[in-house]
Image (spheres, helix red, strand yellow):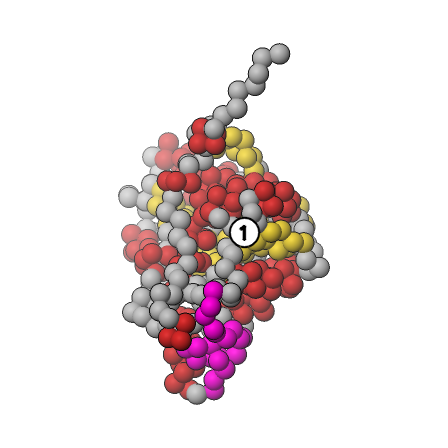
Amino acid sequence: MAKEEVKAPQELEKDWVLMQGNEAVAKAAIDVGVKFFAGYPITPSTEIAEILAEELPLNDGVYIQMEDEISSMCAVIGASLAGAKSLTATSGPGFSLMQEAIGFAKISETPCVIVNVQRTGPSTGLPTKPGQGDIMQARWGSHGDGPAIVLYPDSVKEAYELTIRAFNLSEKYRTCVILLMDEVLGHMREAVLLPDISKFRVINRLKPTVPPEWYKHYEEDQKYLSPLASYGEGYRFHVTGLAHDAHGFPTNKPAEVKTMVTRLKKKITHNIRDIVQIESFMMEDAKVAIFAVGIVSRAAKSAILKARNEGLKVGLLRPLTIWPFPDEAVQKMLRNVETVIVPELNQGQLIHEIERLTKDKTDSDIVKIQKANGELITPNEIYKSIKEVI
């Protein structure tokens, strides 16, 4: 029997592979240097946990299945404070359970990534069917004025790329970043040519360079970035969910509390151009725009191509970053088009953001296509809506 040829790792990266969205997330996590995963299996995200249960121990990492999603999120925060890039993955009810700890990660400015592979809800809902009902929860689910960075891919390859980007933004801005997907993106398989990880800029957290006695866990600077020491590195600091001062110790002094909440907000708003990422598809001369995310945007592109073949001027604006919301790009779109069609797998969430930015549009200028029954919005349904408004 001929000896099987063994390819070097760098050659494997150049091969086309048939891969699920969930597999792409897990691969990206390993490639970007994740060393800790804590989670509880839940459809339709379970493959992420299954793969990392095998891969993390082989890559000097730790996998632990927790008793529920509350403890999973707390374990992820603890591992990150100890210096490990940390990840959890969940869906539906699990994401709801994580909300208090997500708020803790935000106020303590602890980097971590949460993958939410959405399904039809509410409650247990339809565990094996797609949904987009968590878009508002991803921004507002945790109480208080906490910032949110939320990304949403539309393909298996982009699931890989945005997982890496989620960790980069998390480490850079010291916050939790949410990667939203949906059941179809998580489970569908595509032939993808994944770029080598060496082609990506991998960002690791900024480490302190001052002596331990000078270290402030929440140091101020003009870019609202601050070094992050890990437990065990000789730096003393306090971590709490209470309002705190620059050293992390609880405070109720109005000036110190204002400094804290201002930093949480402005490290997002002052870096909006770095954080927000959008795709403009055939929007140059569009009179009708479709605003969609995730799997729905793929149906929209198919409908647009069909419409363009008939000479209809239609385009797509797709936010890869849905929070913070791309206000500037949407406002430009609203100035240049006559009608906006918003298809989404819920009873109306993204459409409210479009309406928020509308000043001179009427109800007939913003058209909704909404499904919350576990079925996908088809290209023909979007095409039909295009024909009705042109």
Residue type at mark 1: give it: Lys
* Residue shown at the point (40%, 49%) measured from the top left: 202
Q: Residue furthest bottom?
A: 253
What's drawn in magenta, residue-wise? 233-252
Q: Quadrant of residue 307?
A: top left
Camera-side residue of 334 and 273: 273
**In terms of secondary structure, what is the magenta stretch mainly?**
loop
Residue 20 appearing in the image: yes
- Where is residue 49? Give x, y as percent: 62, 48
Camera-side residue of 40 and 203: 203
- Per the image, the residue denoted by label 1 is 35
Q: Is residue 240 left or right of residue 162?
A: right
* Residue shown at the point (38%, 79%) measured from the top left: 259
Camera-side residue of 367 and 54: 54
* Residue shown at the point (33%, 56%) measured from the top left: 274
- Where is residue 183? Give x, y as percent: 59, 46
Q: Is residue 234 magenta?
A: yes
Q: Does residue 145 lie above or below 168 as drawn?
A: below
**Badge 1: how crowded within 10 Å, few (<14), some, or many (20+)?**
many
